[in-house]
Image: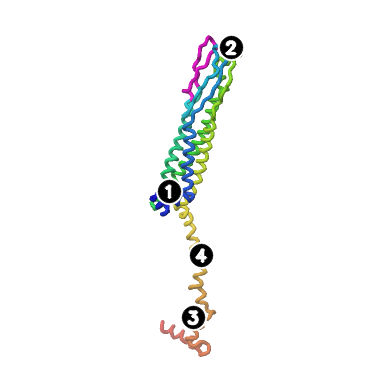
Amino acid sequence: MDVANQLVAQGQFTVVKQPLGFIKILQWIFAIFAFSTCGSYSGMFKMSVECKNRSESDLGIEVEFEYPFRLHQVYYDAPTCKGGERERMFLVGDYSSSAEFFVTIAVFSFLYSMAGLAVYCFIMEKYRENNKGPQIDFVVTAVFAFMWLVSSCAWAKGLSDVKTSTDPEKIITRIPACDEQENRCREIYDPKVSGLNTSVAFGFINLILWVGNLWFVFKETGWMGAFAGTYVPSQEKQPAPESFDQGGYGQQDPYSGSQGGYQPEYGQQGGYEDGGYNQGYEQQPTSFSNQM
């Protein structure tokens, strides 16, 4: 506890109060929810086949299925209503690719979020050195955002197919004994897929978190400053009024009466009062003849 208090006192965990660290925590939590609700699912449905001959009926046919939803490997035995014989039936469809892809992205997102949070808390200065850490973080975050989009859409479609393939009403239509009117087939228990619906919702929530985190990581990369720096030269070319005030026409105004104007020159050369105008006028031919 003393070590934890010292770290807090030194500001090691202040980053979790900032959007960059807080969103990382949310990514970590919702990634857990995503792969746990999908990867740990197991469901069951129940139906009955009542034959004309009651002794051949089966009023409690239970069919269990689970992640990764290779339904074509799930089977059940249904009565044929012909002398007590039973027929083995299989479900239809293999949706393991979309389900496993979704869970894999969730697991890797969990691991990356946990590693990123550790970097933010303990080696933030190293992370920001030369902006290499933020730039790599931005690229990886963009990749995960895209993967969440693809995996969530794929799993949403896969879940829709899973619901169709495990619907007792449709499965009954594939049992040969149910085609005969003297036999009665009905569903007893539908599978509960609320957990799978939640997993899809968590997938799109993760998509929003990773896309939103792009902005905060982008601000750490230094690219924003580079983009803003393209307008600096045009701003540096605007101090023209200052140049006029410091060394422009304001100091050399011949009519202002300041030093460096024409009045001091005339004053030094005699001016109008002392006859300097004539002296200055006579000096020009002299200088011109000397130059010749």
Q: Which residues are magenta?
A: 71-90
Does the stretch in magenta take in 79? Answer: yes
CA gap, disc 3 to disc 1? 58 Å
The residue under the point 47% across, 45% down is 25
The residue under the point 53% across, 19% down is 61
Say if 260 sits above or below 241 in the image: below
Residue ID for mark 4: 238
Of residues 158 and 80, which is closer to you in this image? 80
Q: Earlier in the sequence, mark 3 or mark 1?
A: 1
The C terminus - image quarter: bottom left
Q: Earlier in the sequence, mark 4 or mark 1?
A: 1
Quick one: which residue is furthest to the top in this view?
83
The residue under the point 41% across, 44% down is 115
Q: Secondary structure at mark 1?
A: helix
CA gap, disc 4 to disc 3? 28 Å
Please indicate whether residue 134 sits to the left or right of residue 59 in the image.
left
CA gap, disc 2 to disc 4? 98 Å
Q: Earlier in the sequence, mark 3 or mark 2?
A: 2
* Residues at discs 4 and 1 in contact (Cβ within 8 Å): no
* Residues at discs 3 and 1 in contact (Cβ within 8 Å): no
Q: Mark 3, residues whose alpha carbon is within 10 Å: few (<14), some, or many (≥20)?
A: few
Q: Nearer the viewer, mark 2 or mark 4?
A: 2
Q: Earlier in the sequence, mark 2 or mark 1?
A: 2
Tell me the amino acid under the disc marked 1. Answer: Gln
Say if 126 sits above or below 84 in the image: below
Q: Earlier in the sequence, mark 2 or mark 4?
A: 2
Residue 74 in view, yes or no: yes
CA gap, disc 2 to disc 1? 72 Å
